[in-house]
Amino acid sequence: MFYKKLFNKQTPIPETLADRIKDVQSHEIPSHVAIIMDGNGRWAKSRALPRVAGHHEGMKVVRKVAILANNIGVKVLTLFAFSTENWKRPKTEVDYLMKLPAEFLDIYLPELIENNVRVQIIGDRNKIPTHTLRVVEQAVEDTKNNTGMVLNFALNYGSRTEIITAIKNIVQDHDEGKVQVNDITEELLSSYLMTKGINDPDLLIRTSGEIRLSNFMLWQLAYTELWFTDCLWPDFKEDQFLDAIEQYQKRSRRFGGI
Ligand code: FPP
């Protein structure tokens, strides 16, 4: 395959995508893209493989999509890597999913750094195993001065818990006299969420044919464009990501106006 280097030091993008990339870049690129990466288990099952093989394949897709998103000018890519409900899965699968961020960063962090990507996480850190948290927090530290795309992993993340925690903190600050009732606005609540400082997603992608939000960024997705595909996450490639961006660019966003 022929590759063309688009930017200094950045990972080359396949030449076959050059025309499509040029085309999407001539329109508005969504600043924040969020993805519910679903279908790893079914992908594995259809190949008579263990479910974890689907997660491993899904990890490689994360790298491809992150590199492309950064290249085309996405500012924030939030990926739902583990939900507060995923603890209900068999222990072997949970253990595997908790090892994946470390494996991903072990393999791909140098490349992400070359591409000027900044790693962040949202989610309840309390339940995340120390070995996972240590590696992820180190990556956050190592990339904190990078000015490219924020690659934001939602790890042990649940939107309702996030909102409840925000409300508790607002009430506590109110009791301490730091917040008055009339100060409570959408902006204030947003500033108490884990996504503080990050704009709401412009585009949400969910793979695998499921049409639901599964407790993901419920507050932040209020005006987000939603795009669903039957493609299973391990089969999701650069072309599908560009399909989603092209669809987004055809939408008319009115935010309740006319
Ligand atoms: C949902 O598919 C997927 C997950 C719960 C895990 C997502 C994790 C990855 C894509 C791996 C990459 C992660 C990192 C941190 C690099 P599912 O297992 O529910 O699929 P199914 O609905 O087909 O069973």
Image: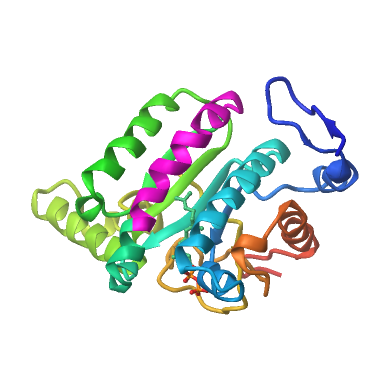
As drawn, 93 above or below 108 = below
The N terminus lies in quadrant: top right
Residue at the image position 76 percent from the left and 65 percent from the top: 251
Residue at the image position 50 percent from the left and 35 percent from the top: 107
Name the quadrant containing residue 10.
top right
As drawn, 200 above or below 216 = above
Residue at the image position 25 percent from the left and 52 percent from the top: 128
Does residue 206 appear left or right of residue 121 in this picture? right
Label the magenta part by its dominant secondary structure.
helix
As drawn, 232 above or below 26 = below
Q: Tell me, yes or no, if residue 23 can be seen here.
A: yes
Residue at the image position 59 percent from the left and 44 percent from the top: 63
Q: Residue furthest top?
A: 8
Does residue 209 appear left or right of residue 160 in this picture? right
Q: How was the colour assigned to the protein in this rendering?
A: rainbow
The C terminus lies in quadrant: bottom right
Does residue 253 appear left or right of residue 4 in this picture? left
Name the quadrant containing residue 164.
bottom left
Residue 20 in the image: state x and y as whole percent: 86, 48
The boundaries of the magenta stretch are 96-116
Q: Residue furthest right?
A: 19
